[in-house]
Amino acid sequence: TPLEEYPDLAQSLVNYVFHTQEPVILHDASTTGNFTKDTYISSQKPKSVLCAPLLKQGEIIGVLYLENNLTTGAFT
């Protein structure tokens, strides 16, 4: 399913994690980090975001995207 069908998440962040297979934790997503200009992040201003690759035997099978809109630094 194309990522464009999921407008309620930071698509540039998910694409980055998918391609690099590296997790990203944003402690204050709307004000710091490389994804502040993402359309979703700039409009919705989530506080904390965690995005991590799901790997099986070294192959990416998905991406986990979690967001917290109540507090910064929610994910460690």
Image (tube, helix red, strand yellow):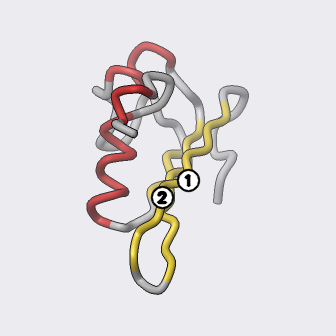
The disc at residue 25 is: none
Q: Position of residue 47 (x, y in %)?
A: 59, 31
**Is 59 drawn above or below residue 28 in the view shown?**
below
Depth check, mark 1 against mark 2: the one in front is: 2
**Which amino acid type is marked by label 2?**
Gly
Q: Position of residue 55 (x, y in %)?
A: 49, 73
**Residue drawn at x 50%, y 59% as measured from the top left:** 52
**Distance (Cα) linking label 1 and label 2:** 7 Å
* Category of crowding for the residue at label 1, using alpha-carbon neighbours closer than 10 angstroms: few (below 14), some (14–19), many (at least 20): few
Residue 3 horizontal side relative to residue 9, left or right: left
Check disc 1 and report the residue beneath it.
64
- On the image, the x and y values in percent for residue 60 come to 41, 69
* Residue drawn at point x = 47 percent, y = 35 percent: 29
Q: Indicate left or right for 46 with 37 as reference.
A: right
Contact (Cβ within 8 Å) of mark 1 with mark 2: yes
**Split into 4 quadrants, where in the image is the C terminus?**
bottom right
Q: Which of these two is toward me, 2 or 30?
A: 2
Give residue 32's position: percent from left, percent from top.
39, 37
Q: Amino acid at mark 1?
A: Leu
Query: In percent of the image, x 41 and y 33: which residue is there?
Result: 10
Judging from the image, what secondary structure is the residue with disc 1 in? strand
* Residue visible at 65% across and 52% down in the picture: 75
Q: Quadrant of the N terminus?
A: top left
Q: Nearer the viewer, residue 59 or 76?
A: 59
- Residue 11: image quadrant is top left
Which residue is nearer to you in this view: 61 or 29? 61
Residue 62 numbered tag = 2
